[in-house]
Amino acid sequence: MISYVLRKLGYALLTLYGVVTVVFLLFYLLPGDPAQMMMGQNESAEQLAVVQHKYGFDQSIGTQYLCFLNDLSPVSFHSTSPADFTYDDGLKYSAVSLFTAGETKTVLKWPYLRQSFQKTGKNVSAVISETLPNTMILALAAISVALLLGLFLGVISALYRDGWLDKLIQVVSTMGMSVPSFFSAILFAFFFGYILHEVTGLNMSGSLYEMDDYGEAMHIQWRNLILPAVVLGIRPLAVITQLMRNSLLEVMGQEYITTAYAKGLSTFQVIKNHAFKNALNPVVTAVSGWFASMLAGAVFVEYIFNWNGLGKEIVEALNTLDLPVITGAVLVIATLFIIINIFVDIVYVWLDPRVKLD
């Protein structure tokens, strides 16, 4: 188990290195001057030179790439000059010195995602820490709705195979997979948040935390979570329903299920004690993939419902060409995706002992 996890972590580091390289090439080799993006139309030649030197834009691409890797690496190298630890915000790395060799100091630190171009003096890590929890809550709520309803509907559909109820569930789930999330978000916001507002009490838009009427304190508004969670969970709900139905039908055709029926067990007991757990493997794969993709796919849903999450922050960063925020968000999402996949591989062993961690 330990060797498997270490090997997976090694693959994860290689994957992250590839993601870091691609992100750097995509965003830092774009046409245009990042300094001009930051300053808008009011810059002078002197001001541009100061900003380019401050953020290292006047360095060669190779030097910028190495500095980018050094900032992201938990173990980084710096000269012994105190100025080397000073960055755009005038603060030093929060780092632990490991050892010094000559004029090079090796330190241990959290990955530094640099500063936002548009949010003056604000680190990207602070921007992500403020918005990622809201996206995680939305994704967890959405996948919970999809998982609970999808497993239930999948079992019902398998039990009434080829009946009218099965066909109805199949039609609805197919529609759920084919409708884009942004279109569903617009329909749900307009219908349940506007037309039926008096009945549902739901708003067309709103985030988890909102200021009270007196502007004195922030309060949690759980009702604002309902519509975006349902919309975001529609497509995984449809996929989980289909997968659970097909997997359960396959399991129910196994010989040990026939033996369980021969022993006098009821259908409920057979499904509960034997078939349900063994039918979960493809569902776990789908859930892990959908949950990870929700962290990135919630962009349009968050923007339409004005949910203050990482997805909405990415849209705003794209509109203002805030490259450090975009880069940091992509790297965080990629890291979470890799962690979730490793966790799911380990869960497979619990679900099916026949699966070996080679």
Image: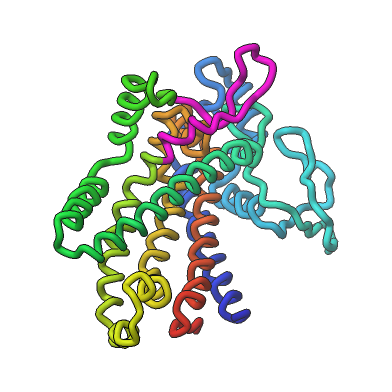
**Does residue 210 lie above or below 65 as drawn?**
above
Residue situated furthest front in the rendering = 264
Q: Is residue 38 left or right of residue 301?
A: right
Residue 184 magenta: no
Name the foreground residue: 304 vs 239: 239
**Does residue 59 lie above or below 277 as drawn?**
above
Name the foreground residue: 196 vs 286: 196
Residue 144 location (% of width, % of height): 46, 51
- Residue at x-position 56% and y-position 52%: 62
Name the foreground residue: 300 vs 49: 300
Residue 184 location (% of width, % of height): 30, 36
- Residue at x-position 21% and y-position 46%: 175
Q: Is residue 217 left or right of residue 209?
A: right
**Colour pattern:** rainbow
- Residue at x-position 36% and y-position 72%: 271
- Residue at x-position 30% and y-position 77%: 251
User: Is residue 163 among the parts visible in the rendering?
Assistant: yes
Q: Is residue 177 left or right of residue 329?
A: left
Magenta stretch in the rendered image: 205-229
Residue 128 location (% of width, % of height): 59, 40
Q: Is residue 107 left or right of residue 164?
A: right
**Does residue 180 lie above or below 272 as drawn?**
above
